[in-house]
Image (cartoon, rainbow, N blue to C red):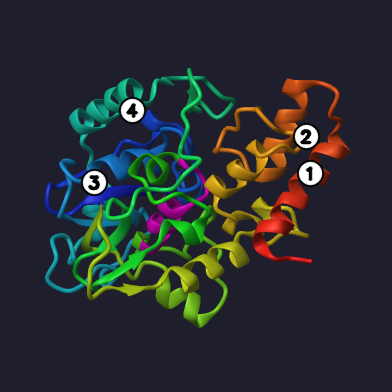
Amino acid sequence: MGQYHSVVSLDAPGALRSRLFGGGVKLMGQAPVGWGGVPTALALAIGEGGAWHGQRIAVIGDYAEVGDLPDGVPFAENPHEAYELSDSELSERLVAEIDERYEVSRYVPSSFDTSIRRPRKLIDLGVMDAKAGEEQYVVNLDARTYLDPHAFGCARTFDAIALTGESVMMATMILLAVSNGRGGGDFGSQTDADRELVGSWGGQRVVIGPRPVDGVDISEAVAEMVWRCEGEWFDQDWTRIGAVPQWLLRQLVASGDDLASVPLLDEFDVVERAMLAGQLRGGVDYEQAVGVARGLARAVSGVN
C-alpha cells in the first residue's frame, strides 16, 4: 500500500496541507515538485523570517513507528500523531505568499483531484549565480551538515532553491523522511549507506541560510544517491544530467545555440526544456532539440 506523508514542524507544532500546493500526498509525489509545490512552501517556512525558521522539522508518513524520530524531540513517542497534524492557516498564508511572490497560478485541476502549479510569468532563476557572500545553502543546524545547491543543478539563491523542481529541496525532503521504505511512493533507497542518509535529518533544525563555517558538506553523497535511485526521471543515457547547474545551462543556451533567446522553465529537465523550446520556436524538431540538449549536458558535465 502507498504511504502518505506530511511535512511537519515538531515545535510549532503543525504540518503543511500538501494538496493545497499541488503534487501528491506520497513522498515522491511531493518532493520533486517545483514552482510552488510543497518544497517551495517548506523553503519559505524554513528560510530566514519564515514561520518554521530554526524549528525541528520532519517528513512523517502514516506508517511511522516509535523510534523513527530522535529521542527527546516532540512526538518521539507517538510519531503518527505528528503525521496527523495540520496547519491550515499557515498553509493558506504560504499559498498566498507563493502566488504573490512568484506569480504562480493557484490551481490547475488534474485527474488526481490535486493541483499543478504553473507560473503566470517566467521567472529568471539566475543566469548568474548568487553574489559572493550572499550564497544560500540548506543547513542542518544540529548536525552541522549542509547541502550545496550546485550539486543538485541549482543556483545558490533563495528563489532558485525554493522553485527548482527535482533539486536540492527534493533532497532535503528525502533527508527529513523518517519513515521511508514502508510503502508505495517512498524514495527508492537501495544500499545500507542510502538508508543511513534517508531520514537522517528528521527531527532536527533545518534552515536555508549561509554556509556554516564549521559545517560538513554532504552534497556529493546525497546527490549521487538521488540520481542513482531515481534515475528514471532522467534520460538513462544521462544519469548526471540533473547535476548540471541550470544557471550554467542557461548561459550556454543564451550564448548562441539553436535554443538561444528561448525562455526556459526550470521545472523541466533539460531534454524536456529543449523539446519545449523547439515547440515554441518552430523549426526545431524533436530529434534536433534532444540532440542540442544532450550536447549541452555533455559540455557541462564532462560526459563523453
* Marks 3/2: CA–CA distance: 37 Å
Identify the magenta region: 164-175
From the top left corner, tell me how far across and down residue 270 is, in percent.
Answer: 66, 44
Q: Amino acid at mark 2?
A: Asp
Q: In the image, what residue occupies the spot 66% across and 56% down? A: 241
190 or 183: nearer the viewer: 190
Spatial separation of the CA atoms under disc 4 and disc 3: 13 Å
Whichever of callouts 2 and 1 sits on the residue coming sooner in the sequence is 2
Q: Residue at point 39% right, 46% down?
A: 161
For label 2, the residue is: 258
How crowded pointer 1 is (Cα within 10 Å; few <14, some 14-19, many 20+) is rated as many
- Relative to the observer, which residue lies in front, 177 or 102? 102
Q: Position of residue 266 (x, y in %)?
A: 55, 38
Q: Position of residue 213 (x, y in %)?
A: 22, 71
Farthest residue toward the bottom?
A: 192
Q: Is residue 37 left or right of residue 254?
A: left
> Closer to the observer: label 1 or label 4?
1
Q: Which residue, given by chain and number where applicable, does mark 1 sit on?
A: 292
The residue to which callout 3 is attached is 47
Marked residue nearer the N-terminal end (4 or 2): 4
* Contact flag, marks 2 and 1 (Cβ < 8 Å): yes
Tell me the residue that label 4 is attached to.
98
Dot 1: element: helix
Quadrant including the C terminus:
bottom right
